[in-house]
Image (cartoon, coloured by chain):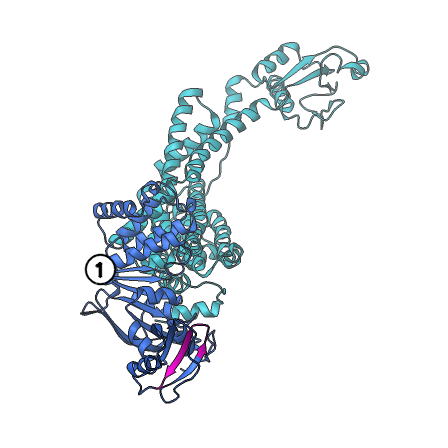
Amino acid sequence: MNKITLIIQREYLSRVRKRTFIVTTLLFPLLYLGLIFGTSYLSENAGTKLKIAIVDSSGSFTQQRIDKANKDFPNSTLTLVKEDPATLSKHFDQKGFDGYLIIPAATMVSHSPDHLVVKSKRTLGTVSDVQTKLNAIWSDIKYEDLGIDTLKQHLLSQSQLKVKSENTANKTADAGLAYATGFACGMLIYFIVLLYGTQVMMGVMEEKTSRIAEIMVSSVKPFQLMVGKIIGIALVALTQFLLWIAFVFIIYNVTKAGIGSNNAVSGVIGGVQEIFSSINIPIILFLFAFYFLGGFFFYASIYAAIGSTVSEDVRESQSLSFPVTLIIVFGFFIMMVAAKDPGSPIAVWGSLIPFTSPLVMMARIPYGMPGTVPYWQLALSMGLLVASFLFVAWFAGKIYRTGILMYGKKPTWKEMVRWAMRK
Amino acid sequence: MDLLQVAHLKKYFATQKAVDDISFTISEGQIFGLLGPNGAGKTTLIRMITGIFYPDAGTITLDGKLFDPVSDIGKIGYMPEERGLYKKMKIGEQALYLAQLKGLKKKDAIESLKTWFEKLEMESWWNKKVEDLSKGMQQKLQFVITVLHQPRLIILDEPFSGLDPVNSTLIKDEIFNLARNGSTVIFSTHRMEQVEEICDHIILVNKGQKLLDGTVHGIKQAFKEHLYKITFAAAPPQDTAPDLFEVKQTTADTLVIQKHPDVNNNQVLAHFLNRGDAIESFNEILPSLNDIFIRKVEGTPLARRFQTLQD
């Protein structure tokens, strides 16, 4: 046992102290920050403020109304002009306008035109800003025309029918939140398994190519070496995620203090807080830890076995690990289906079969138990995962024990099975 | 006292009998040579003694008790032929880690490391990485790591490959030192001149079986051909005494003779002395281990053929 601790220690420290670990750990939150600030900056400042000339033949669009709209919606500027459309069309751009719009004389509340056209000498793209603005003016005109006072206006805009789904077996499950939580959990497990599973494989290959494997197995059992490596790398993954969570928390607090209510940041964190307050945190956290560890150990054992059969060639490892990676990616797609429709047969089967269950089950659980996930399904899924993890670790350990001392010829699958069967 | 007893050890792989019924004993403090051509089964034999492989049949007794890979690992220091270290790890940390895996306490490991580093002039290496070292330097480090935990049994597989003569001598002296202090050394190689120089006792294996077992002196005696080299002050005499010996070779001042088995040396010397020849030296020519090795292994294919085993 003491030896496994030593191995875990080395595997952990040698990775955590590496420059690449520090760089990726620091870089991720910076990229995250950049993404949030960048997108909000872009959405606010990248679009040009359109200056549009309005020629009003209907007489409803008064200077007063346009001034009010310009104040309420500052993303574009409307200017009322009295010029003749024919002359305006020739030199509106020289006057500093991006385009002009003619409101026909026949425009009335009972008879609104199909389209108003902003005419321009260049492509303006979407003119939704202008549309919103004109509609705001148009609403005022409509209300006035129909004699609706502000009280009635308020009533009209507030009175709407809203539809959402509810699971009668589990009334607390909120579909939107459950989707977000399930998707996030599945995604995290997917990344951890893929990223750090291949790290296990590379670590085993490093031991083989640097020829230290024989020295190691003359001091410790191969199984101890394998388990120590897997646990050490699992701890590295955990460390990185905890650091990231800490960073995100710090960044959130800093940005909240710094720029007030940045929509993107507070939106994300607000969502997270809402999730935390409305779902059963302890159970989700426990199951997340269970499926994270189960899934990681399951796949890391397979990756370790693959790494032990490869001698020098990195391409060999790629061709051997490709099917495994494919299964994980396949699990990811089932997870996306399950996050949307947690009761579908593919989601149920995916959450039971150990190859995909760590990802898929985590997408279903936030929808609630026993409403969406009956207890027997959860128990079966967990039991199968534990049983198959033990089997895979035993099987991989056998292959690892033989493979780690083999050099030269690449073993066939048949040979690997024979290694595993030998006592 | 016998430190290691190996009895009827067998290990069959799918395609060959790697070790096929080998027995031998090594007494404490001995430097024991394990010889054999490539693919003879030496590495498999060693891997069973170090607990890496389980034997298919047979027993290994270490220090009077049946060998138990888990608890006896600390008593053995093994330097495999395929050697290597973690390239990116600092040398001091690496040596410490490997020593701790052998069961050494951290404090003792540091102390022992410092003594060894000082002895082999490696003090400045502590914070260097393995990838910064030359091949010979890595070899030295590997040797230190092998013997750091003061193992009772030290197994060295081709320990001098890649070392220059200065470092070879350094390591050789350390091996003698260790043996003098009570460690037992198994020395696996196919470099015969080193074996003659270092080993007390050897066995020769080929195709998974033991061909020879004995002391270097004993084996040489067993394979001697009664050849003698006589150096004369003047040109050697031309006439011979066919009842005593046959002349095998003549040069300007020497004669190589093969005496008949029942003739003793005094009779041969008396023959020349009676003739009045001035003899400068009279030496027995013993076969070198190299000759014996080649003679025993010759005729068998150099590389092992893959055999199919019937289960």
Is disc 1 surrounded by few (<14), some (14 to 19) or many (20+) residues within 10 Å? few
Q: For the stretch drawn in magenta, what is the main secondary structure? A: strand
Q: Is residue B256 magenta?
A: yes
User: Residue B303, image x and y in percent?
Assistant: 47, 73
Horizontal and vertical percent for residue B143? 33, 54
| Figure check: A187 above or below B17 | above
* Residue that appears at 39% across and 76% down: B292
Q: Answer with left or right where residue B28 lies relative to residue A263.
A: left
> For the residue labelled by badge 1, is the local secondary structure a helix, a strand or a loop?
helix
Residue type, mark 1 in image: Arg
Question: Residue A255: x percent and y percent?
Answer: 42, 24
Colour chosen for chain A: cyan
In the displayed orientation, state which residue is furthest to the front.
B276
Task: Residue under label 1, please give it.
Answer: B180
Q: Can you tell which quarter of the image residue A91 is in?
A: top right
Q: Is residue A104 left or right of residue A178?
A: right
Q: Is residue B150 left or right of residue A134?
A: left
Left or right relative to B253: residue A6: left
**Chain in blue colour:** B
Vertical comparison of B288 with A165: above or below: below
Q: Which residues are magenta?
A: B249-260
Q: Is residue B13 visible?
A: no
Q: Residue at x 27, y 51 (%)?
A: B99
